[in-house]
């Protein structure tokens, strides 16, 4: 978003302000969730680890075309909202602090998704068909990279859980934990966003039938896995 804001420096000052504010809020979100992670880590049994380095992931993502990065970002903003609305907001027994963190995060993500859509559509209008073909390839590669991270994290998270709470689980039970955890991660971080009606309308409106066919073919193993 900071890079995109440069396109508005000498133009639309309202757009510039919106993207700078967007960036500021996302930096705030990052710090918010770092603090949440520290609070959780203090009470969790030792041994938990994250497989992906966030800075390395960011560098890999930003190496792709702007169109693909905006598509992925819009997808994330939408599934984040859905996660709060379906899994957190209706639950009465959750920690009030936990609910508040995600409620205020959701309120800002609603605005961010609108900005993502505006910038994505603006970028889409700038591309030639050849550039769009490359952008679609980039999006497919980004989703595959996300799935690779999910597979790796689900595997280590399953082993962490089983080491702590799985003494009574053997054989098939342990395998089911591994499989269901991956399925849950894929649902949360890929499938729920891909199947979001608004994201589907946006993506379909910005791609040809053939391009959508390539995207759907790439998604099929994840959606049906």
Image (tube, rainbow, N blue to C red):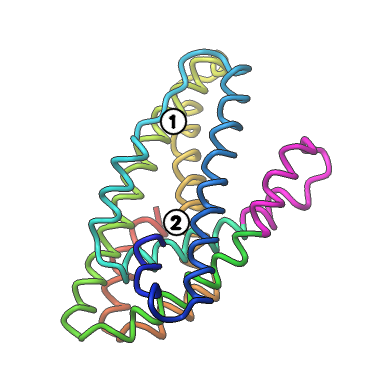
Give the CA distance from mark 1 to mark 2. Answer: 22 Å
Residue 175: image location, x then y, percent:
44, 30
In the rendered image, the vertical position of residue 159 relative to residue 54, given as above or below? above
**Residues drawn in magenta:** 83-107
For residue 62, which quarter of the picture?
bottom left
Q: Confirm whether the magenta stretch covers residue 173.
A: no
For residue 109, which quarter of the picture?
bottom right
Q: In the rendered image, which residue does mark 1 sit on?
A: 175
Residue shown at 56% from the left, 30% from the top: 37
Along the viewing direction, whichever of 35 and 168 lies nearer the viewer: 35
Residue shown at 26% from the left, 50% from the top: 60
Residue 160: image location, x then y, percent:
47, 21
Residue 69: image location, x then y, percent:
34, 63
Along the viewing direction, whichever of 167 and 85 lies nearer the viewer: 85
Q: In the rendered image, which residue does mark 2 sit on?
A: 190
Category of crowding for the residue at label 2, using alpha-carbon neighbours closer than 10 angstroms: few (below 14), some (14–19), many (at least 20): many
């Amino acid at each position: 978003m900071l890079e995109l804001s440069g396109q508005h420096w000498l133009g639309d000052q309202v757009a510039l302000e919106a993207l700078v504010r967007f960036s500021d809020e996302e930096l705030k979100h990052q710090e918010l969730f770092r603090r949440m992670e520290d609070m959780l880590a203090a009470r969790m049994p030792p041994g938990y680890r994250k497989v992906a380095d966030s800075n390395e992931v960011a560098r890999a993502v930003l190496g792709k075309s702007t169109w693909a990065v905006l598509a992925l970002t819009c997808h994330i903003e939408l599934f984040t909202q859905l996660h709060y609305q379906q899994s957190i907001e209706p639950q009465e027994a959750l920690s009030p602090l936990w609910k508040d963190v995600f409620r205020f995060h959701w309120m800002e993500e609603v605005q961010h998704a609108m900005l993502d859509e505006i910038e994505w559509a603006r970028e889409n209008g700038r591309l030639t068909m050849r550039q769009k073909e490359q952008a679609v390839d980039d999006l497919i590669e980004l989703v595959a990279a996300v799935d690779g991270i999910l597979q790796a994290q689900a595997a280590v998270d399953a082993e962490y859980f089983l080491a702590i709470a799985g003494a009574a689980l053997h054989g098939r039970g342990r395998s089911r934990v591994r499989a269901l955890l991956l399925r849950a991660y894929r649902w949360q971080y890929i499938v729920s966003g891909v199947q979001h009606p608004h994201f589907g309308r946006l993506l379909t409106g910005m791609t040809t039938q053939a391009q959508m066919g390539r995207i759907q073919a790439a998604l099929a193993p994840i959606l049906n896995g």
